[in-house]
Image (cartoon, rainbow, N blue to C red):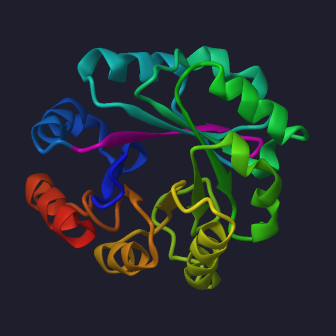
Amino acid sequence: MNKEQGKISASLMCLKLKDLENDIKIMEEEKVDYLHVDVMDGDFVPNYGFGTDYINGIREMTDIPLDFHLMVMRPEDKLEWFKLRPQDRVCIHYESTIHVQRTLVRAKSYGSKVMLAINPGTPLYAVEEVLDYIDGILVLTVNPGFAGQKIVRSCISKVERLKEFLDEQGYGDLELAVDGNISYENAKLFRNMGANIFVAGSSSIFDGGDLRVNIEKYRDVIK
């Protein structure tokens, strides 16, 4: 993958349901890279979101690859629900399973890209033992579960330190994604640190303005 070009993962949690079909058409025309699907079980996070019927409906609307963010306990028991495709990616939380390495291996068996997600309070050393099993790391810059939160400020230096660590350990080719209040300003900041996938939501492309204009503006920030 060419990491010189930043990629947009548009957060469906921030999209108004009444605008869903029209906005997906716009995102297709604007060549948005992924649709970010937040799957929440009310256990790992105190919220619910995006069941399998909804996800299957999205698949019928578009060929844009899906970017699954599994905010669920024991994701290894739920992977088969989502009909993962090679062009999709799936993010497994380090904190959501006892046997994270085994879960990542199982996720890989579906042929999609596999990311390890870490919460704001999870230390960077948590990723060290599983670098050979993943295609990238998703850094949560807010505590997961709800849209519209403000960035956890300590996560700014965390992203920079993670990128330095990956380069030093010879894993600089792993993708680095950021999720949580990734506004235009924050996206530019993280892009300069080496992030290449940006989950865009209510603080950017879905801020109530013209979606097409917002996508173009965001693309310009992360290019």
- Residue 83: % across, % down: 52, 15
- Residue 52: % across, % down: 53, 19
Q: Quadrant of residue 61?
A: top left
User: What residue span does the magenta drawing correspond to?
Assistant: 32-45
Residue at the image position 75 percent from the left and 69 percent from the top:
124
Residue 177 or residue 163, whichever sits in front: 163
Vertical arrangement, residue 200 with respect to residue 112, above or below: below
- Residue 130: % across, % down: 77, 48
Residue 154 or residue 165, whichever sits in front: 165
Residue 87 or residue 172, whichever sits in front: 172
Residue at the image position 71 percent from the left and 45 percent from the top:
132
Residue farthest front in this picture: 170
Query: Can residue 209 be seen by looking at this rendering?
Result: no
Residue at the image position 55 percent from the left and 56 percent from the top:
146
Q: Quadrant of the C terminus?
A: bottom left
- 69 vs 148, left or right, is right
Q: Is residue 46 magenta?
A: no
